[in-house]
Image (cartoon, rainbow, N blue to C red):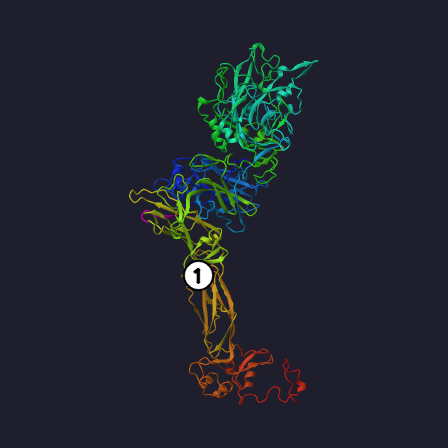
Amino acid sequence: VGVRGRWPVVLALASALCLLVLPGASAQLAVAGAKNGGTYRYGHIHWTSQKNEVEFTVEAVFKRSNPTEYFSGTAADGFAQVGDTITLTGREHPRFYFGDDGMVNILKMQVKAYSKAEDWVMGDVQIKHTYPGPSDNGSPWLASFRGCCRSAQLANNKDSEWVIAAEVDLTQADMSPRAKLLPVVSVPFRPADGSLPKIKVPAADPMNRHAVEWSLAQPWDVGNAAYFSRQQKSFMSVPLQADFNGSPSVPGFSATSTGAECTRDPNNLNSVSPGCFYRLLRTDSTLQAMTVEGWVKIQRPQAGGEPGGYVLSVGADSGRDGLNAECSVRDPANRDWVNKCQISTFYIKVNDTYIAVGHDLDRAGDDRVVNGAPVIASPAAFKREAAFRVCSHPTACTETGGSLTGKWVHVAVQRYKRGSPSTDGTSRTWYHSYRVLLNGHVLEITRYPGGSRVAGEVDYDPGESDKLEGPRAANTGAGCCPGGVCTCSVASAWSCGCLQKFQVGGALIFGAYKGAAQDESFFEGHLDEWRMWHGYRAATEIVDDMQRKLRPELNDAYGNPADPAIVVNLDPTAAATKGPSRVSTLMALYNFDHSQAASNVCGRSGLTGCELTNFQPNFPEASDPRLKSLSGSPGAALYKAFGYKVTTSPTDDTGLVFYSAATDTTGGTVQTTGWSIRMDRGNLTLNVPNPGLYQVVVMLAMQGGRAKVPVDFIVSVVDARWDDSQGDAQAAYRLCTNGIACAYPGNDYMPSLKIKAFAEPFSGCSVRAALNGGQSMMDLENSLFPCSLITSPGVEVRLSLEGEDHQLGAGLVTWDARDTAVGYGAGVLPPTAMLSTSNGTNPSSTSFAWTPCPGDEGYHIVCFEAVDRHINRTTGESGPSAASAMKCVQIHVQADPAPRFVVGAGRTPAAANFTIGMETAFPLHVVDDNCLDTLTVRAAESGGVSQLPPGAMLVPQDVSRATCASALIHVVWKPSYKHGGFQQEVCFVATDSGGGCRGVTPKDTTYCVHVSVARCRYALQMDEQLQDIAEHFGMDWLRLWSLNLNMLHPDFVVNYGQQISVGHLYRTDSRRDMPSDIARRMGMSLELLRALNYDVNLALPLALGQELCVVPNSCTGSAHSALSSIGFAQNVAAAGSNQNPVPPA
């Protein structure tokens, strides 16, 4: 499993970290992990982009007390604290790979939080990188953060390396989703509702443009295996050519200095050159040993037949273009062609119940000459094979059930040369022995086709085969051994079958046998992660590394090549002594991921059913120095594999290949079945056999699977069960009830946590932050993630965390503040957020406060836990701590809305009518969806002058009990005698505070109310008489009385506020009437007309139909109307028209 030119990507991981006030749920991880296993705890990659530039943020947690100067800091204990910068280190140096051959090998992390008690340090690494294009030829760039190792206390994947990978396809997304959770999430083993342990995995698209999709990670999300079909005759071949582009001095191929070509020093480029690799596969006399290993799953062909078959072999290079010139024409009747191009110098065959290994034995000595023409033996070679039975090792037999069909198994084959005198005394025959390990268990021989064991030979290891003759037989050509001395000079090389011209034009073949001892045969099944080593790789090394992805770029040789005592022996010291190399140097690695194919037609890595053609190895890479030194070499093309009908397939998902199975930490038995983890829309359910620490990987993506990032974190399944035996008020999770060794001696209960806020219901399960209007704080239990707490920039969001813990005392559940204290842990918080210190001990509380600013718009998730601490009041020693279940609040910061006027009945009116002399008010009701905002209301101005009518006032009303930002203003006005007929749009401006962020501009909203004052109507004041009123309006009391027919007596005492008429309403019937014309006709002064009609401009004509208030005076007014003595017929058309009436003749 892996990715192109990079190293195998497995699973990526989550972001979120504890900033604990007290020791927490991972205390058991910290205590045990401080002595054993790796230092890595969790991490998370998220990214944003501009064009092709991507900014990565790597959030990670490591063990704090790493005994290295890289993790030193300014804290009193010499380690890092907030504000320090540390250089990440580990058993394998952490590195960041961009996926386009770029890499950062020194990662400096800014410390954001730490816990001395839990022994962890958290921070982030910021990295910018510009990609050559928006995608990797249609596939996402796979950026990864990797190193080793995880904690040894995990129930699964313990002490293994980590790989955190993020997909970057800038044609699909410009940012990734982001996860926020605690690095160790606690959950009770037996929840209160009787269900399985479950948690929510909080994640969001920060800008809320796309929905987030969750899925449980599978191994093939980041890699795949290769499927070979016998019916399709699938195979994959790597050519083994004697030279390259005709160069006679290519390292590893020079015929005149075989010793220098493959030295005993694994760090010498010649010892790991392509020629040396090819000679290993061709059984060179100067090379002592090699090891080949990998993962295989055989299956039965659909058309029937034996399952499995030839997994790997060296044989004829056929079925592709560009064959070696000397081997391009198939000629199985020609001994030269057979020995040079076809003979199989090595093969591995896996069937249901055994693993067979061996090689072809050259039969050149049996060739004949018939009628003057050479006739080669048939078959041209014999098979020399040793078969190792699966059930020859009891553990291997138990693990596989005695059958390999349909199961992923690891097969390792060790081959080493043995020397022995020939039987005729004139030549030296080559012999090789084999050893096979299945899942790290050494198998035993079931048959010895190579002959019986040599009497008296005692240096066979357990599981080791007899020495098998070949693949080159002795004395295979005339003149091979002149004078009784067998040589392999260049001149005699071909006729003698010596190595320099023996199997030099064939290929390393995956999935088929194409040798000389039988017809072609093909494999049915799957292969993954095959490695070729120079040297005899010890069984302990094989077991240590078979479930971990190797990092050749970090270590040239796996072993200790610096020790001269364990170098390769070029020649055995005695004929009966084997000569294996004790140093194992990696020569080649093929992982079969589709991303390694030259034509990545399937898009992103991990898809299955895609054809693998022109396949590159994972190692060596094109940039490897041993390849650059080759004259005319195109780099990794030397190791390129040609694929025919080979397709990608899912790699292992059973917890075997690179994923250790879950372990029962109490009994030590391996749980390969019976436990599972499920993911459903962000809800993670664990069906696990026992409490413990479980590593979990969840894949997060934007809608449609875009910008996928894995989240890797730890779930602490706590040995706890719901206990309500003391009543609902004191119900809590009781620790240590599963009948196993208690991990919390002296600690009786998990603490509980409540998160509260001043909030009010908003939409669905979401709430919005509210003001303290005297109401109680809302418990957010039903509004936790994925629901939201809605707020806006510029105002403070405040959460109250309340924790408590129960302890047993005198047979009853009690709160013992003397022995118990409750603190709090938090995940990654926004940069400007604050978490206060604890208030009280048990119960206790703390508060989270944050003022988001405009750049913070989007979704932010904050996660918390309550953590207990128990101190023996006598000894002062602390007991083990437990943490509550994680609770997360999703804060949705929306753009700050402008305030708005609430319009309608009982609210802000569209129009307001007043009466002269009566004080009247109308409301301005203003609200803001940002409940925490502060509002002000003022009258708009025109030309720097307030639009309020003269004498009007804005009177604020009490809204202190409101829970959301609001303002209630009464517009109060008592029109004077001269305001009759007042008509005006009066506008008001509501403005919010803009909050506490620098540069934030307050927002405002304008709303206008049509304000009018009735004409000719007046409201009586207290104890006011007609004479007083008449004087105000320039008339006598008789005329005023005559205007109010409902007043039966002029001295009648009127009520306060009673409305009376102070004139007649008059509507103009011409557009040419001037105010002075109306005043003259009515016998009233122009000043009185103006006083009674506020909206009249004395200098302008009146509008047709304009309403006026007039007080006619019969003494001074016109004696005739405009229609006096007018002929009716003559003036019908003029009535109500724009024309002046026609005067009488």
The residue identified by callout 1 is: 963
Q: Where is residue 692 in the image (x, y as percent from the top left)?
A: 43, 40
- Residue type indicated by callout 1: Thr
Is residue 1112 found inside the magenta-colored segment of the image? no
- Residue at the extreme left: 874
Q: Position of residue 806 (x, y in %)?
A: 36, 48
Is most of the magenta stretch helix, strand or loop?
Answer: strand
Q: Nearer the viewer, residue 236 or 348?
A: 348
Q: What element carries label 1?
A: loop
Against 990, residue 290 (above or below) is above
The N terminus, quarter of image: top right
The answer to whether residue 1015 is seen in the rendering is yes
Q: Which of 582 and 840 is in front in this view?
A: 840
Residue 515 location, quadrant:
top right
The C terminus, quarter of image: bottom right
- Residue at the extreme top: 483
Q: Which of 586 and 1076 is in front in this view?
A: 586
Q: Position of residue 836 (x, y in %)?
A: 38, 51
Against 758, residue 13 (above or below) is above
Q: What stretch of residues is rendered in magenta?
A: 817-824
Against 784, residue 911 (above or below) is below
The answer to whether residue 240 is seen in the rendering is no
Q: Where is residue 861 in the image (x, y as percent from the top left)?
A: 46, 50
Against 33, residue 461 (above or below) is above
Along the horizontal axis of the image, is 920 left or right of 808?
right
Q: How crowded is mark 1: few (under 14 residues within 10 Å), some or many (20 or more)?
A: some
